[in-house]
Amino acid sequence: TQLLEQSPQFLSIQEGENLTVYCNSSSVFSSLQWYRQEPGEGPVLLVTVVTGGEVKKLKRLTFQFGDARKDSSLHITAAQPGDTGLYLCAGGHNYGQNFVFGPGTRLSVLP
Amino acid sequence: KAGVTQTPRYLIKTRGQQVTLSCSPISGHRSVSWYQQTPGQGLQFLFEYFSETQRNKGNFPGRFSGRQFSNSRSEMNVSTLELGDSALYLCASSPGYGNYGYTFGSGTRLTVV
């Protein structure tokens, strides 16, 4: 079983602060995705990274895939209350195999 | 482009009953995956259907089953419901190949009493 760990489990910060959350595994993934889930809704895909060392930016969010393709980080600059939610990472292997999800980091951004 | 539609949104059932949940994927997507989400276990993979065939299966008992129709719509069924089956059941649609991510529905909140 390939497991994904995420840290921290919970994070509560003030609006305007920066933060980084992590996703780690002992397995190598062919791709890794980040999702954000709000209460009562399904997760929404934020980004997919496929190349070791890859960095992608989505407005104030920066995603990095580790060189060995076993870990990833999500950095948020100047967090806003709208960033509040459960951030999930998911690792995928080859064609035709399902993605494995981490337990998530629950972020709360206070105004 | 319509999103992933799951019905019903909420369901209350009694122990021992059975339930059927429905998912309509994005048009053109051939893969439908089902996940169970609970506060304690997070997102747990149930099964995936691709072109009407079960392609992958998670570690759930045989009481959990599913199927996919020729129009890619999918249903999952849980028989002999237990209290522990109370969860948010999420359906995820994808093209079924490559590294495309999932598009999730809003889920069905099942409560077993």
Image: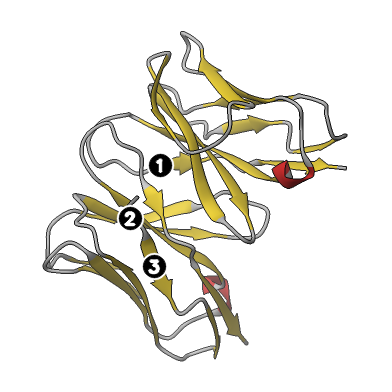
Instruction: Indicate the secondary structure of the residue bearing disc 2.
Output: strand
Q: Point out the image quarter for the C terminus of chain B.
A: top right
As drawn, the label of residue A33 is 2
Q: Position of residue A67 (x, y in %)?
A: 11, 68
As drawn, the label of residue A5 is 3
Instruction: Indicate the secondary structure of the residue bearing disc 3.
Output: strand
Q: Are marks 2 and 3 in contact (CB under 8 Å)?
A: no
Q: Residue at x 18, y 53 (%)?
A: A50
The nearer-to-camera label among 2 and 3 is 3
The residue lying toward the viewer, choosing from B86 and B68, is B86
Q: Chain of mark 1?
A: B
Instruction: Indicate the secondary structure of the residue bearing disc 1.
Output: loop
Q: What residue is shown with label 1?
A: B102
Q: Chain of mark 2?
A: A
- The type of residue carrying mark 1 is Tyr
Left or right position of A17 against B12: left
| C-alpha span from label 2 to label 1 | 9 Å
Left or right position of A19 against A55: right
